């Protein structure tokens, strides 16, 4: 119990002193995660020519805030999460599990059956702590995103997908390379170094 309290205390200390936490507060973002998207957008110009965008695992909504601040007001921004979010102007929010067919159907309705220009996923599945179980959970989730992109992302469209180092990463990258011309692995500076999260920037979807 004492060890757990110590861990919680050190997380709180780190969080309070974190540069990106301060920035998020100052700029009215709901979480520091906004700066990961901002950083990758600055480097890779992710939002160029984007009109219809899907943000998977969007709660509490800082990526959605970044999108609505940086895309034109007539763009179509759709967010999906298991958890509710506080309402955001110009955003269609769908509450549910992305791997449910009914949620995919709601996404397609929200796009007005137009193919997406950009798919973002910052989804982190609930982890059990059992390595094999967690790796296969992450693998299945990413496979379902890639399958979704295959049908619903425009040719030449891009996807940015969070995954975790280790396990099935190599085979996921191989799978992504079948669908996209270029797959770049990125660990943004604003991603905590102790986190194993990384992002796959999947560029230029093949036909
Ligand atoms: C790290 S948070 C995302 C933070 C978000 N990018 C932001 O800027 O506020 C990850 C989210 O993924 C969601 N999530 C995990 N698995 C999901 C699933 N299968 N379907 C929908 N959302 C999921 C979780 O509920 C959680 O809110």
Image (cartoon, rainbow, N blue to C red):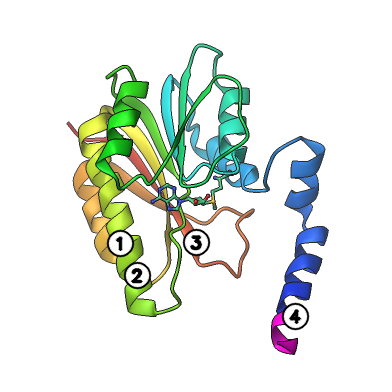
Marks 1 & 2, CB-CB < 8 Å contact: yes
Q: CA distance from mark 1 to mark 2?
A: 6 Å
Residue 2 painted magenta: yes
Secondary structure found at label 2: helix
User: Which quarter of the rendered picture does the N terminus lie within?
Assistant: bottom right
Residue at image location 42% in from the left, 67% down from the top: 165
Residue at image location 80% in from the left, 48% down from the top: 22
Upstream in sequence: badge 3 or badge 2:
2
In this view, the mark in front (3 or 4): 4
Q: CA distance from mark 3 to mark 4?
A: 25 Å
Query: Which x, y percent locates residue 46?
Result: 47, 33
Residue tagged 2: 135
Query: Which residues, given as a range, are shown in magenta?
Result: 1-6
In this view, the mark in front (3 or 2): 2
Residue tagged 4: 5
In this view, the mark in front (3 or 1): 1
């Amino acid at each position: 119990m004492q060890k757990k309290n110590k861990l919680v205390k050190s997380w709180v200390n780190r969080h309070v002193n974190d540069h990106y936490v301060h920035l998020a507060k100052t700029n009215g973002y709901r979480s520091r995660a906004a700066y990961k998207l901002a950083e990758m957008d600055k480097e890779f110009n992710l939002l160029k020519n984007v009109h219809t965008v899907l943000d998977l695992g969007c709660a509490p909504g800082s990526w959605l805030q970044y999108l609505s601040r940086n895309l034109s007001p007539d763009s179509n921004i759709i967010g999906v999460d298991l958890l509710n979010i506080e309402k955001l102007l110009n955003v269609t929010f769908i509450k549910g599990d992305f791997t449910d067919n009914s949620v995919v159907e709601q996404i397609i309705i929200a796009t007005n059956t137009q193919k997406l220009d950009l798919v973002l996923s910052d989804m982190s599945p609930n982890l059990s702590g059992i390595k094999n179980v967690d790796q296969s959970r992450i693998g299945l989730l990413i496979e379902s995103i890639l399958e979704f992109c295959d049908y619903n992302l425009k040719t030449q469209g891009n996807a940015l997908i969070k995954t975790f180092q280790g396990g099935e990463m190599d085979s996921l990258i191989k799978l992504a390379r079948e669908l996209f011309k270029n797959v770049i692995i990125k660990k943004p500076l604003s991603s905590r170094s102790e986190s194993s999260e990384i992002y796959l920037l999947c560029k230029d979807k093949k036909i």
